[in-house]
Image (spheres, rainbow, N blue to C red):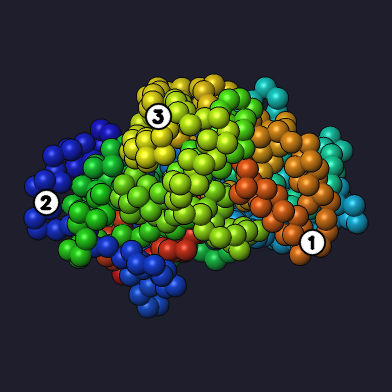
Amino acid sequence: MNDERFPALRRRGFLAATTGAAALALVGCGGGTDDKADSGSGGTPKRGGRLRAAFAGGGASETLDPHLANLFADVARAKALYDKLADYDADLSAGPRLAAAWQANKTLDRWQVTLRKATFHDGRPVTAKDVLYSYRRIADPKQAFRAKASLEPIDLDASRATGERTVEFVLKRPTAEFPDVLAAFGAYIVPENATGTDFDQRPVGSGPFRFVSFAPGRSAVFRRHEDYWDGAPYLDELEFVVANEESARVNALLAGQVEYAHELNPTTARAHEGRGQVEIVRLRNSAMQAFCMKTDRPPFDDRRVREAFFLIADRKELVDGALSGAGEAGNDLFGKGYEYYADGLPQREQDLDRARALLKRAGAEKLKVTLDTSAVAAGFTEAAGIFRDQAAKAGVTIDVRMGSKDSYWSDILDSGTLCCYRSGAMPIEAHISQRLLTDSTTNATRWRHKDFDALYQQAQSTRDKTGRAAVYERMQRRLYAEGGFLVWGFADWILGTARKVRGVETKAPANTLDWARFDKVWLT
């Protein structure tokens, strides 16, 4: 960061000089988040002002191409400039955005999507041709766009515009959760024939803010789009400032150099609790924390060993130690609080006696196993050490092996037997389809069962939502009993805001519509 307007973004020692006079106030830390934090409420919204938001960035290679959005900063900028046909609500169900309505045929393999009346920043209407162009660009086999895998169910050669604002999507198979595809991460709608050079020099979207300027790795400035279909933003301008160090983001917030700081760690929030200068917002259930067991190889090809490991985990100790208490215990299933989550299953507790008995029956009384971890994600190395000590009480020896931050995610996909794992928010259906089917491309647990695949296809072929939910519950009950994900917790995502910031939603897990939704934010 070389912008002299933000010297504190580069001065790591600034925090020590300011904490005595001003520090963080913790809001929404208790069990309930029924209301917005102080940063989220505060009377009648008012127009005007510039909000500066600090995010970790990607350096000089940053782009405003929304189809390449991978970092949180990329996504936040993309959603300010562009729209998707749908987006995820707080429970990760898909709600309409540029799509005003959708309707499936009886066999769930053709969907008619009707667009709402919306315009791009240059005044052109958003049309069916723009939608098809955007999706075909994402699906280009020569490119590595974020949403490509999510759009795989669509036969884009057969799909067509049936009117200026209507699209018929032809699917390769029945897909009851097709709205999830429309809401997929990175599936933004761009003008027909937009090219790579357009996005960084003169990006035109249909989102709430218009482009003003962009300096990769430094800042991006956007201005209110008065004709935005969902209502013009309250802010006059929005600036994204890059600050890769968490301490730099905190420092800038404390110094009044930014009004919004993304991705703060629990220690920072807790250390400055109650001091009153800034607000802390905790987005619950934003990140699954787990240990991933390879079910296709010893020792975890024996379900008794997997069940023993479920019972070895003291989840509260893991949440308190690895997440500094900023989260809640998991129950070996993904998606707590999300649509279709099987919340009726009993909360699993540590039971070392039963774990030892299971290991004995499996002939694994003196089991030794390597646990792969890395500093690639917050809490990983701490969780590995805590679980190693928990396992020792059950007679299991765990050797913690540190992996490379650069290659960890690719390394653990196929190699090893046990590893630390994390996932951001996504629909439970997407978690299953991308990670738990025989042909899933990121099947880290190597969970491959044809009858489980068949249940997924049954769910996707079930038109009735209640019936579909019953199938998803069957699948989750099986994963709870014998799956490969030991889900020990769900981490909060922590944001910091200046006290004058209002309208920040506190019930939106990271990756959902209302996360980083700056068109609904205002300054007092």
Of helix, strand and loop, which one carries label 1?
A: helix
Of residue 63 and residue 391, the one placed in the foreground of this image is: 391
Work out which quarter of the rendered image holds the N terminus and state it. top left
Of residue 23 and residue 492, the one placed in the foreground of this image is: 492
Q: Is residue 307 visible?
A: yes
Q: Is residue 60 visible?
A: no
**What residue sits right under mark 3 in the picture?**
397
**What residue sits right under mark 1 in the picture?**
467
Left or right side of 131 for 73 = left
In this figure, what is the number of numbered marks? 3
x, y percent for residue 288: 49, 47
- Spatial distance from mark 2 to mark 3, Cα to Cα? 45 Å
Contact between labelled residues 3 and 1, with CB atoms less than 8 Å apart: no
Of helix, strand and loop, which one carries label 2?
A: helix
Residue occupying the far right of the picture: 106
Q: Quadrant of residue 277?
A: bottom left
x, y percent for residue 442: 61, 32
Please state which of the two labelled residues, at mark 1 or mark 3, is closer to the viewer.
3
Please state which of the two labelled residues, at mark 2 or mark 3, is closer to the viewer.
3
Label 1 crowd bin: few (<14), some (14–19), many (20+), radius 10 Å: few
Task: State which tag comes first along the sequence, 1 or 3.
Answer: 3
**What residue sits right under mark 2 in the picture?**
18
Of residue 227 and residue 10, the one placed in the foreground of this image is: 10
Of helix, strand and loop, which one carries label 3?
A: strand
